[in-house]
Image (tube, helix red, strand yellow):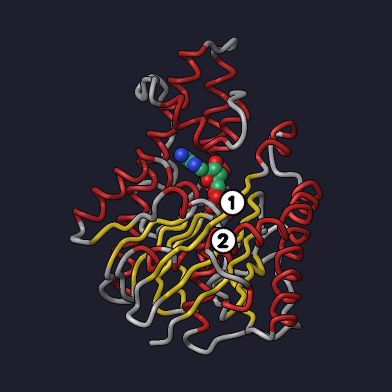
Amino acid sequence: MLSLRVLGLETTCDETSAAIVEVSRDGTRRILSNRIRSQIAEHAPFGGVVPEIAARAHVEILDRMIDDALKEAGITMTNLDGIAAAAGPGLIGGVLVGLTTGKALALALGKPLVAVNHLEAHALTPRLTEEVGFPYLLLLVSGGHTQLVAVEDIGKYRRIGTTIDDAIGEAFDKVAKMLSLGFPGGPAVERAAEKGDASRFALPRPLLGRPEPNFSLSGLKTAVRLAAEAVQPLNEQDCADLCASFQAAIVDCIVDRTRMGIRAFRQQVGSPTALVIAGGVGANRAIRMALQRVAMEAGLKCLVPPPALCTDNGAMIAWAGIERLRRGMTDGLDFAARPRWPLDEAAAKPGARA
Ligand code: KG4
Ligand code: ZN
């Protein structure tokens, strides 16, 4: 096996990140650096990510982040074997910043470019930190995506289920906004939920028991809004109880939908090697614990990358770059940024959020 060292650039949403990942001849993987700068402070006054602000913030800082990543790794650009840049899906202004920078570096250094699908990077992250072979069942839960995917090989994905409306992270963010808990919502809701009574509000569990492993969140979100309106003005305890009740409903849905996903995987693909959780929502402890139980029940290993590799980061882009590069899968400098880029191009609706 070749030893490879790749620079990864991530700019698809509100994190600017540059990272260097290395794989040695014996297959050992090492993250040499993973510099991440979150734009949370810039977007917080607006309660969500503002695309123009995001693109500008990426442009202003990316060069410096790359320098810092190289310094921390103790290498220079000439020691790189390739450049990997997230080329979508995401906010197009930001994607262009990272992809164009990646192309310029690849051209100037005469190194190969890998245009990485951000979702593929989330999907492959567990292979950076653990030994896991194909095929595995991936639950991708982030701010923009909620999908159950069969990862059959690099570049070979089959969508087993998806959300028919909101993404789970988006639901967390919207509930947090409703309750004035700040942005991003996931961690704030999780924190509030710890002090709350999950049985106080009876909230719906959309699609529970349905055989197709899809998700639906909008009814639950509306139910939270109605419950909040019914107790106005909300004190801190009301708010904690609502968050706990909401999180419990989400956990029940995820557990049931993932069980159905495992069943569908066995019917459509065969035996999964593991249940893998990826995306920012994977940082939620209640969700992680519930999914560990689901995996155990099904006799599967449950793999969740550490929280810093669950949320957006350059190391996952560099790693996806290595996975592709070592199979000779590189891209031309004319590769166009893609605001939408589903993992499973063949998958029909519903959802079509990718
Ligand atoms: O993967 P990610 O960093 O960005 C993309 O959307 O691609 O995921 C961000 C999402 C946000 O919606 C955020 O609220 C959610 O992940 N999130 C969480 C937690 N930490 C982040 N949701 C629930 N609980 C958390 N602890
Ligand atoms: Zn992401």
Residue 347, image x, y percentages: 54, 72
Amino acid on which the number 1 mark rests in the picture: Ile
Which residue carries the number 2 mark? 314
Q: Is residue 169 visible?
A: no
Residue 8, image x, y percentages: 58, 67
The earlier-in-sequence mark between 2 and 1 is 1
The residue lying toward the viewer, choosing from 89 and 41, is: 41
Task: Write down the quadrant of residue 299 in the picture.
Answer: bottom left
Secondary structure state at the residue bearing disc 1: strand
- Spatial CA span between label 2 and label 1: 7 Å
- Tell whether circle 1 marks a residue whose Cβ is less than 8 angstroms from ligand 1: no
Amino acid on which the number 2 mark rests in the picture: Gly
Crowding near pointer 2: few (<14 within 10 Å), some, many (20+)?
many
Image quarter of the N terminus: bottom left
Residue appearing at x 56%, y 32% in the figure: 175
Residue appearing at x 65%, y 39% in the figure: 40
Where is 36 relative to 77, above or below?
above
Q: Quadrant of ligand 2?
A: bottom right
Crowding near pointer 1: few (<14 within 10 Å), some, many (20+)?
some
Where is 40 relative to 141, above or below?
above
Residue 230, image x, y percentages: 56, 15
Residue appearing at x 75%, y 61% in the figure: 92
Q: Is residue 317 visible?
A: yes
The reply, left or right, for residue 129 in relation to residue 79 is left
Image quarter of the C terminus: bottom right
Whether residues under marks 2 and 1 lie with C-beta atoms below 8 angstroms apart, the answer is yes
Residue 89, image x, y percentages: 65, 64
Where is 211 relative to 28, above or below?
above
| Numbered circles on residues, count | 2
Which residue carries the number 1 mark? 36
Where is 234 relative to 323, above or below?
above
Secondary structure state at the residue bearing disc 2: helix
